[in-house]
Every structure is written in structure tokens, then in C-alpha cells.
Image (tube, helix red, strand yellow):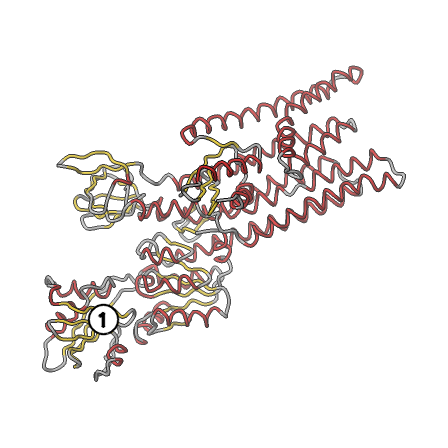
Amino acid sequence: MKKEIQLSRIHCVGCAVNLEDKVREVEGVKSAVVDFAAKKVIVEADGKEIKEVVKRVEKCITKFDSSIRIVDTSQREKAEKREKFQKWFGLAKIIFAGVLTLVGYLLPAKIEWLKITLYMLAYVSVGLDVLYAAAKNIIHGKMLDENFLMSVATIGALCLQQWIEAIAVMFLYSIGEFFQELAVGRSRKRVQSLLKIKAECANKVVDGGEEVVSLDSLKVGDIIRIKAGEKVPLDCKVLEGQSYLNMAAITGESREVFVKQGDELLSGCINGEGVLLASITKTEKDSTVTKIVEMVENATKTKAKTEKFITKFAKWYTPIVVGVAVLLAVVPWLCGQAFSVWLYRALTFLVVSCPCALIISIPLGYFAGIGAEAHNGVLIKGSTYLEMLAKVSTVAFDKTGTLTEGNFVVDKVFAKKGTTQKEVLELVAYAESFSNHRIAKSIVAAFEKPINTAFVEDYTERAGLGVEVTLFGELCVVGKAELLKEHEIKFEEAEEVGTVVYLAKSGKYMGYVRVSDKIKEDSFSVVEKLKACGVKTVTMFTGDNEDVANSVANELNLDAYYAGLLPEGKVESLKEIKKEGTMAFVGDGINDAPVLASVDVGISMGGVGSDVAIEASDVVIMTDQPSKVADAIKIAKKTRKVIYENVIGILLVKVAVLILSAFGLSGMWLAIFADVGLSLLAVLNSLRAMIYKDKKKGKKSTSK
């Protein structure tokens, strides 16, 4: 059983990641996801124990960070307003502290008592929240966090009568936190916009009229009416009407798509101008928009190696630096040096040591990258896969439905002497009538007559080979040449460019049906785009024969191809190619699920792909455009670059300022820059990952 716990005042994506780890350790918790964008914790536990588990989780959250508030779901709107007020009230306190400090500084030295009074009022105004949080966290056993470090450093500065220094630390820290919150809020709003694409209700047609119903009450086959300006509530098929759909929320494409009777609609799209009557094809649980929301909510569930490294690094780094700061104050004093001088250096050292910049900017960078991918119509199931995507050196594509349109057309029927083309097409159509494969459907469509399934018996589908079935009382074998060879049927293989479906009845070869597919326009640019973003090898896997594979590979200028592959054959071929480096596989069908699950990065074409392929993959492209793979890799590489810039830059600056502090060459002003200033710069740099621009199209993806 799952339970949502609504949170307030969780402003740090790094804290969200660490909180998730803590909640998962709570007794009775089966799984936990902290949704930073929606500010909630989703806990799964045994139904009988869920209430007790939630209580333990709430206690864990409070203990983890006293500033985080647990909010009743029904009071969410009030909590948001209160949080917004607190944010701007905090800014007012910062301004007030600044004014008091300036007045105190301008006062003549002879009224020192008033100067000190104003300084203390300014310090309390801007630093009370930090001191309070530090005290509460100490009570809960959480020390060595940023609040503790800032409190110790500034109280020490006050003891040394460094009034301006102490105020400056709290003042600049608070300003940095304010702007950091604004920047993180921008990233959160961007991802939250993805979570709002789901409609809240639908117009169900009943007895000639209509009623507004909840989405979970709709079943497959129910009729709904979608009015102009409304979101498509669930995946459905148009029965009446025509209109233009805004697909931007789902596919990242700004252009509108014309739809008419018979067209499939994806939930989450916005109806433009016409009124559509549609039949539900998927329930709320299985609809496209639900899967998108779940993927976005769970995107932080899997951590990248960089995130794991930073979390471990921070656990060791902070205690070590605090220990060094203590030694820096005590050892010189024991050796006869002035205690106040070395205490000031140690306090400066403490301010610098805070690892917030690293802890915040790294997960935020991945969060922003995942948001940029989603706005471009690419869903990433976690930062691990975003990191892996940036390392991809080889991309393998499935052919049918991925590089080609998958809209097969029967363009030739060959009948051996003694039979007719009509008979061959009829038997093959009957044999394929139970299959959901695109080729099978195209053959049935070409037959153009209703099929009486009473004459279809003992149907057996052989994955990747064909079907064995009894038709009109006689055993028929329909499929690839390999299947006929397996049955030891004598025949001549056709030298055709296209998919050939052979027919044998009662052990005798009767002829074949040739089915052709068209290459997608978008596929012709995919190799060039992938090479431009650093991919070394672009290859293709297909179950089609050598001639078909060779023809498609030459047209698309692929580096290599593998033809005549069964599902297990694709997995075996994959093992060989994977030795060359990190590999991605792009597919869309049920037959692609095994290879999607076993490759380094499995990418499914969500716009046309099967549910099985989407579940097995790590990345989902919400359109049927293969070139989106190149866009996804570019965004992943940019995200990785931004994160590496943060890690290297932060560590270099901190080490440099730590050394300067130890030798007394740095004051608290520089220390504040090395902490708060660096954190803010790192956050702003992380948000660069949200911006993606296609140079050729001039299309720019930014938050609104």
C-alpha cells in the first residue's frame, strides 16, 4: 500500500536525495521516493502497518531536518501561500539587517553601546533562523551541517568582537539562500508543469447526454466528448469529429497535429478547436499521461555514480575539515601563539568547509537535465541513465517501426503453379488473423474480406519465425524461410527486397506474399546527427533478410547491420557489440523487450511503441522520430559537462581558500564567497542544463 506525505520548505534537491535514503531505512518501509518537484514523500508499506510506518517516517523526516514541515494534503494550498510569505518575509529581514548594520557602521565611535546594540539586532534578525535550526538539529543528533557551521563561525566572531564579520557571514549566507531558492524554484516549476498535464476529469457520454466523471471511473470502450481547449483525459480513439491537437506537453513538438475519425489520441494533449467524440482505449492506470507523471516523479529514484560519490565524499569531508579547524585553533595556541588570531582563522576555515555547493548542485544538475529531456519529448527514468546516455559510443536501431514507418503494404503475391494468388493471400491472411504484428495486420488488410475464425484451429505463433495453424482442416506453415526449412518443406527462396512471408499447406510449398515498408523521413538524418554528438558506430538489428537489411543500411549510410535476427539473436549480437563501449539500443516492439532490458541504455519509441518495450526501457521517446536519440545524447552530454564543471570548480576554489584561511591570508568575506557565493554560482550553472537549443532548427527549450 502506498501513502503520500506532503512536505513544505524543502528547497534543496540534494536534501531530498539524502532524505530519501533515510526514509528507506525506516522499519517497515518497502520503498520510498522523495518527489522534489511535488514536495512529497511516497511511501510503500504493508497495508496493515501503513499508519505506524507513516508515523515513523514523519518522525524520521523531522529528525532529518527540523526546517522541513509535514503538511496535511488538504492544506497544501495554504502551506504554499505560507511558504511564499515566509520567503519574502525572509528577504525583508535581510534588508532590515542590512539597514541596521549600515546605520551602526555610520554612527560615531563614542556611542559604541548603540553601535553594538544595532549590530546585535542585525545579527539576530538575519541569523535567528539559522541558530534555531542548528539548535534543533543538534537536539536530534544532526551536527556538522551548514546551520551548525555557520552558527559556530559567527558566534566565535562575535566573541572576538568581529561584529561586521559575523553579520556579513549571516547576511551573505541568507542572501545566497534566497537567490538559490529562487533558482531551484524555477527548476521545480519547470518539472511541475510536466506533472500538470493530466486532466482532472472527463465528459462521459451517457444516454444521449454527458456527465463529468473522474478518470478512474472510466473503462475501455467508454465514450467521451473532448471539447475545444480541453486536455485529452485518457488514451482514446476518435469516433467522430476532427481537430488540431497541441502535442507539446507529450512530445516536445510545438507544431499542431491534425486528427480525424479513426486516429489514436494520447492523453495529455490539448484539443485545439473542434469537438471530438472518442472511445477510451486505455484506463487511467495504463494511459500515456499516467506513465509520464510516474516517470517524472520517480526520476530521482536511481542515482548516478557522481551523486553517490558526492554523498559519500560529504560524509567524510565535513568531519575531517571540522577536525582540522579545531587543530588549527588549538595547536598554535599550545605552542604560544595568540589564541584569538588562530581562532579567527579556524572559524574562517569552518565557513569555507561547508560542502553545500557540492551537495546541492550535483543532484540539481541531473534534475535540470531530466527536465530538459522531458520538455524535448524524451523521458529518462533516472539520473543513472542520463549519465550513461552521455557515455554512449554505439547506437543500434531496430528496423521495423523504428527506422521505418512500420506501415506495411502487400505489394506482391506469388503463387506456385497449380494454385492462385487469391488462394495464397487468403490462406496467409487467415493464418495471420490472430497476430498483432504489423506485417500480419497489413496482410489481413490486403485481403479486404471478413475472416471467419471458425476455420482457424490449433494456432501457434513462433516468435520471429511465423505461425503454425490448421486452416480448413489442413496444417499450414506461414512465415520465414527458416520455418519452412524446419518443417523440411522443399521450396525456392525468393530473391526479393522486402519482407517475404512463405506459405506451405499440408507439407507442400504454395507461394509467398511480399510486404514492403517505407523508411521514415526523419531516419535519413539520424546517422549524421549521432556522429555530430560523438557516437562512433550506428548499426541496425532486424529480423528481415539480408537483401532488405542491406538496402535500408545503404540508404541510411549505417556503419553496420545484422539481418535475420530472432529476439534471442539480437541479445547475442548485442553481447558482441557491447565489448566496444557503452551501447544504446532503440526499439519499439514486444520482440525488442529482451534486448532493451539487457543493453546499457534501452530506448523505446513511446509514440508508437508497445507497453512492454516502454516498461523494459530506460529512456522513452514520446514521438516516432529516431533523431530524438541524438537530441537526448546532446542534452545528456551537456548535463554531464555542467556537473563536472561544478565538481571541479567547487573543489579547486574550496581547497585554495582553505589553504589561504589556514595561513591567515583570507578573511570571512572570501570564506563566504567560497561557501554561499560558490553555491549560488553552482546552482545557476546547474540550471544551464535546462536549456537545450537545436542549432539547425533554432528551437530553444527553456522554462516559461
Q: Is residue 688 above or below residue 616?
A: above
Would you say 157 lies left or right of 474 here? right
Q: Residues within 10 Å of mark 1 (few under 14, many from 20)?
A: many
Residue reaching furthest to the right = 336
Q: x and y percent of residue 277 in the render?
A: 19, 42
Q: Nearer the viewer, residue 49 or 143?
A: 49
- Three-letter amino acid code at disc 1? Val
Q: Nearer the viewer, residue 277 or 281?
A: 281
Q: x and y percent of residue 316 in the render?
A: 67, 48
Quarter that holds the C terminus? top left
> In the figure, residue 612 lies in which quadrant?
bottom left
Residue reaching furthest to the bottom = 490
Q: How many marks?
A: 1
Q: Is residue 505 above or below residue 345?
A: below
Q: Is residue 413 above or below residue 253?
A: below
Q: x and y percent of residue 175 in the render?
A: 61, 31
Q: x and y percent of residue 484 in the render?
A: 24, 79
Q: Residue at x 23, y 73 (%)?
A: 479
Would you say 406 lies left or right of 421 here? right
Q: Residue at x 16, y 44 (%)?
A: 240
Quarter that holds the N terminus? top left
Q: Nearer the viewer, residue 570 or 50?
A: 50
Would you say 204 lies left or right of 633 here? left
Label 1 element class: strand
Residue of label 1: 467
